[in-house]
Image (cartoon, rainbow, N blue to C red):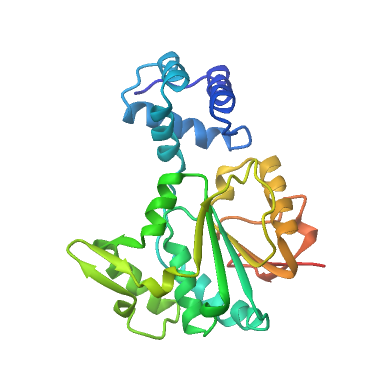
Amino acid sequence: MNEEISMADYLEVIQVIRLRYGYDFTGYAQASLKRRLVRFMGHANVASVFDLKHQLVNDANFFNQMVQYLTVNVTEMFRDPAFYKTLKEVVLPKLAAYPNIKIWHAGCSTGEEVYSMAILLHEAGLLERTRIYATDLNPANLERAASGVVQLEYMKEYTANYIQAGGQQDFSDYYTARYDKVILQKELRKNITFFQHNLVTDQVFNEFQLICCRNVFIYFNRDLQNDVLKLFYDSLSPWGYLALGIKESLRFTEMKNAFENVHMNHKIYRRKR
């Protein structure tokens, strides 16, 4: 599939998706989303944009396949280990002052970073009084995340990340290996609630002391970034923490003055009152 999508065709595809299924991709970064649409057309053997629109209108299963393809994000356990080490040393001691801790992982993908957080909380003695809400647009991501199953082939890399992040135990204590997969400990999963949430259209659903939304903003245009940051601000308690991906920043957004820097390199911020 080498066909380029014109702007007119791109906007028509976005409109079809919004009207037929209620998913609004209007605020996504156009260049990135167009590239992923073209790749999906090649993956699905769709010959033209006309055929793409026809299948979207008439085949809900085809649409579900496309959403899964477009919204599967690369993730891993203890991704950017220095970020987790900073969370452990700077943020968790502050969260420990709360009798009950609520954390939101927005755009949690397949859950690897959510379980990394659960391990950090366990080792800090905070997991028992923490509720983690993990949300994503993609229901297939959520199903996989809730299973707690990870491919065995990744565990060598994840173990190295865990050690660099300052992990205190033998990482293998947190999972059981079965053939080519591992299943994470049930104790890590019991305080996590996975459910579907659309950052574009859904609203505040709780108040949190920490929100993690890493490597999601890169897919949004500036207007949508501002809207989502307003949602996060309204979802945080006073002095609550916000963590973004290391390539993301509040610097050029309308909400930059609503937060203060906690760690510039790891893009950790704190809501001002």
Position of residue 4 measured from the top left corner of the image (x, y, whole percent): 45, 22
Q: Residue 21 at x, y = what percent?
A: 54, 29
Question: Which residue shows up at 71% across the image and 52% down it?
Answer: 231
Instruction: Note whether residue 244 is visible.
Output: no
Which of the 4 image quarters holds residue 48?
top left
228 on left or right of 77: right
Q: Residue furthest top?
A: 50
Quick one: 266 or 154, which is closer to the camera?
154
Q: Position of residue 25 (x, y in %)?
A: 58, 34
Q: Residue at x 79, y 60 (%)?
A: 258
Q: Residue furthest left?
A: 179
With 69 as the anchor, is 257 left or right in this view?
right
Quadrant placement of the N terminus:
top left
Q: Quadrant of the C terminus?
A: bottom right
Q: Quadrant of residue 236?
A: bottom right
> Where 217 sits versus 236, above or below?
above
Whether residue 116 sits left or right of residue 92 in the image: it is left
Q: Judge by depth and name the residue closer to the eye, 2 or 159.
A: 159
Instruction: Identify the residue at image location x=42%, y=72%.
Output: 188
Q: Is residue 163 above or below residue 8?
A: below
Q: Which residue lies at the image location 46% right of the left edge and 42% below the top edge?
A: 71
